Amino acid sequence: MKENPEKKENSELLKELNYYKASYEELKLIMDATFDQITITDGKGILLKVSKNCEEVFGISESEMIGHSVYYLDKKGVFTPSITAEVLKKKEQVTIIQKTGSNRRLLVVGAPIFNKDGKIVRVINISKDVTEFENLKKQLEESELLLDWYRNEIKKNEVKTKDIIVGNSKAMKDIIGMIEHICNMDTTVILLGETGVGKSYMAKIIHKIGKMRAEPFVQINCGAIPENLIESELFGYEEGAFTGANKKGKKGLLEVAGKGTIFLDEIGELPMQTQVKLLHVLQERQAYRIGGTEPFDIKARIISATNKDLKKLVKEGKFREDLYYRLNIVPINIPALRERKEDIPMFIKHFLSKYNQKYNLSKQISLKAYKILTAYSWPGNIRELENTIERLVVTIDDEIIEEDHIPEITSNIPKYIYELDESMSLKMATEEFEKQIILKALEKYKTTRKAAEVLQIDQSTVVKKMKKYKE
């Protein structure tokens, strides 16, 4: 029996249909199994197929995407920009970063498929979710910025000995050499010197160039705190230790300093009772809060300072001898400014620049005024010099600071110091010097007899010179 041609044709169509169905299902299975997002559109940008994981990334269901135009979905904010639109426009493969409605970022590659007439019939897009990568990249960039900030902060806070403003005199260079030697050693240091020589500044330098520079620097002026409060400030107290105490108790500065530095300024003013407790701290490296029964460890380096003669105080019974020797392990004597006059010009320049910058000014100092400032003995040392420069910068209206602006200093300096110049002969300079000495002696001792006695010359000579120089 001969086979029906129509039936045979239907069978072939069914077989072909089943093949395409199986191929579609295989393609769909592959698309759904991949980690990437795959979309296929026709030549007009209508979505034909999407992989299952597109739902999560684009924020809408598969059914809401298939059959819709990419232009519509772009306008709706499902994804933007549309890569299919770009491929159709440029007629070539395109790669872009695409943002989706679910706030994801995709790296998308779109490729066109052409028919034999060169017309685009399909656009296949493969996307990789790079949101986490972008977030990680952003976090990395932020971490790098933060790291740079920390580096800069550390660099700003790190004091290098070559940048320290202390002076060029041999005495100060020797002190800096000593500080460099002991800065990383946990040893007790005492700074000695007159008021205003820079003891607290030096203590900060020791801390900042040492390995514990990132730890706290805690300063307490032992002479500025009432005797009944000094112990609670240093050692802290427990809850209810005394009337008026904080209900939660309080850490003392020795505890607050942690592994950093505790700077005890004016240590010579410390009350005797507190001296005993400080001696225990130095010996045992432990202390008790007021009202406490459990000790806490002292990990901070202890630096002290005084402008008093501690040996004399020990003899007078005002300072414990055992505490003196405990504090005096590394004594550093900071000389007065009058003993290192070669450092004065550097300080003048530094403070003038500092306060010009602070007050947005551009004051200068005349040569004569400069000579007077460098010749002055500065009984208040660096502190007095700094205060004087700041006062001159803010109070003098003129751009140039002259000797007339500092009469209280000029009156203490012989004129020959600031009036000498290269054109003055030796005879003129000698006469000027003699004149200043005699007039100064007369001003101080009032009578020609006393002035002659002090100057070890005849009274008649003083009278004669006085008449000459007062003419």
Image (cartoon, rainbow, N blue to C red):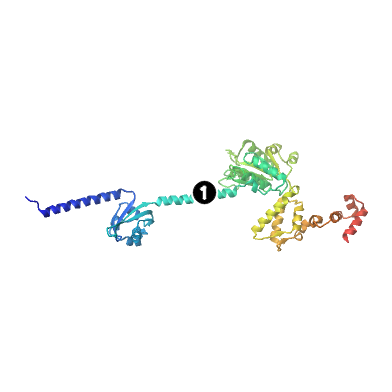
Figure check: 137 above or below 68: above
- Residue 39 picture location, percent across and down: 31, 55
Classify mark 1: residues with Cα within 10 Å, few (<14), some (14-19) or many (20+): few
Depicted 86 relative to depicted 217: above or below: below
Work out whether residue 322 or residue 421 is closer to the camera in this orientation and state it.
Answer: 421
Question: What residue occupies the far left of the structure in this picture?
Answer: 1
Residue holding disc 1: 147
Q: Which residue is outermost to the bottom? A: 397
In the rendered structure, the answer to whether residue 96 lies left or right of residue 419 reads left
Amino acid type of disc 1? Leu
Picture quadrant of residue 323: top right
Q: Is residue 225 visible?
A: no
In the foreground, 77 or 249? 77
Residue 57: % across, % down: 35, 53
Q: Quadrant of residue 260?
A: top right
Q: Is residue 144 visible?
A: yes
- Mark 1 secondary-structure assignment: helix
Left or right, residue 456 beside residue 368: right
